[in-house]
Image: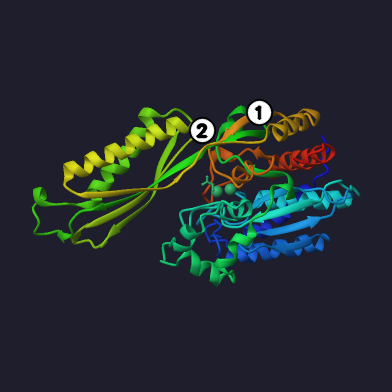
Amino acid sequence: MSFRVNQDRLGFELDRFARIGASSEGGVARLAFSPEEREALGQMESLLKAEGLATRRDAIGNLFGRREGAAPGLPALRVGSHLDTVPDGGRFDGALGVIAGLEVVRVLREQGIQTRHPIEVVAFVGEEAARFGMGCLGSRATVGTLNLPRLLAARDLRGISGAEALRQAGLAPEALPSAAQKPREIAAFLELHIEQGRVLEAAQKAIGIVTDVANYTRLHVEVIGRADHSGTTPMPLRRDALAAASEMVLAVEETVTALGQAPSVGTVGVLRVDPGAVNVIPGRAAFEVDVRDIDFDRKARIAQRIQERIAAIAERRGVEVQVAIPSDGHPVPLSATVVETIQKTCEDLDIPAQKMVSGAGHDAMHIAPFAPAGMIFVPSREGRSHSRLEWTDLADLVPGVEVLLETLLQLDKKTTDH
Ligand code: HGY
Ligand code: MN
Ligand code: MN
């Protein structure tokens, strides 16, 4: 199979971006609105400009590179993803999708291909929820669904608010609503992404054709006990907030395991303890629960049962508990037209592919209700991601970029004005 995509050039760009925010242990850290994310966006903007694309940044910092089409007035065919990462993340999550967009426009130039629709390469900001507990900030702003007051008030682990982070990035919080676009501006959106799971590797398939994206319910739990002297307080008199929270964390795992079926999952990734001193019984503990499923009703049952378990543990232990639900999303079906086009492209290119759902959230899930959107997965070694051990061999990335390119060309031929 001869691909038009240049494997060495793809590898060169992945190496380049992996160095931006690189840690000495081989991970990458480019948090939302961080200097590292800004450096990556700036680097990508220069590369898109060098390809002759007109570039722009919107009010939240999303980067768009535009290659004009032959037919004036048609909406853009967009390819892209995100350049931010989780702390100590991998080099592929997000960056692959944006770098693949750069490679697509490079191949179009080399092959002298002129599309009917304009092609836009996009890098959405703040896809990861790692910093502020809410993700897909750039794609939500694009479709006008960003909860701006929540972002402005959110605080990261250093106590910096979303509003301060935006201002430090040179962005005006009050201008963010102007980032919202109109559905007619987008003919379709395609996102190439690593699978971040084990399905393709186990099935020995080169491509995942994503039909649906799971969504999450997030619970913020505050446990209020009583700070006391760790040496003088008898065990029966304690109101230990961390011991109670620890039981609750295990209850999350037990409940998802008991009520869920794959891809039901539940995680507590953040736990804060106050005052956090070795000789003080914790007076407060706060933790974040992330429950995900492709089945909304099952996810609701799991979240409800988790809340019941938390209340019972608090009652038994004599601590107070406050539960907030900042997010409760519906799983998102992707565009059937785009799914079929990806599938036909894989058949035409004779690349082994399978339809699948995504357990991870992505920018495409926020674009999908707004304009036709699709996702193409490539395998992740041992399914590892959100870790410096995230890896996909270059030879396993190239088919994904080729399918992205060919699907775009197929969509360009279709009248995709919706
Ligand atoms: O959290 C997620 O699902 C995605 O990786 N941002
Ligand atoms: Mn991610
Ligand atoms: Mn991602």
Amino acid of disc 2: Ile
Q: Nearer the viewer, residue 404 or 7?
A: 404
Residue 294, numbered label: 2
Q: Position of residue 100 (x, y in %)?
A: 72, 49
Location of residue 373 by image quarter: top right
In-image side of 242 versus 68 (left or right):
left
**Disc 1, SS:** strand
Which of the image's four quarters has the N terminus? top right
Mark 2 burial class by Cα count in 10 Å: few <14, some 14-19, many 20+ = many
Alpha carbons under labels 2 and 1: distance apart: 17 Å
Provide the residue designation for mark 1. 354
Amino acid of disc 1: Gln
**Residue at figure coordinates x 71%, y 56% from the top left:** 13
Can you say whether 193 is above or below 222 in the image?
above
Q: Position of residue 270 (x, y in %)?
A: 38, 52
Q: Position of residue 153 (x, y in %)?
A: 44, 62
Residue 306 in sight in this render: yes
Residue 393 in sight in this render: no
Pointer 2 or 1: first along the chain: 2
Look at discs 2 and 1 and give the one toward the viewer: 2
**Residue at figure coordinates x 56%, y 55% from the top left:** 137
**Disc 2, SS:** loop
**Residue at figure coordinates x 86%, y 51% from the top left:** 69
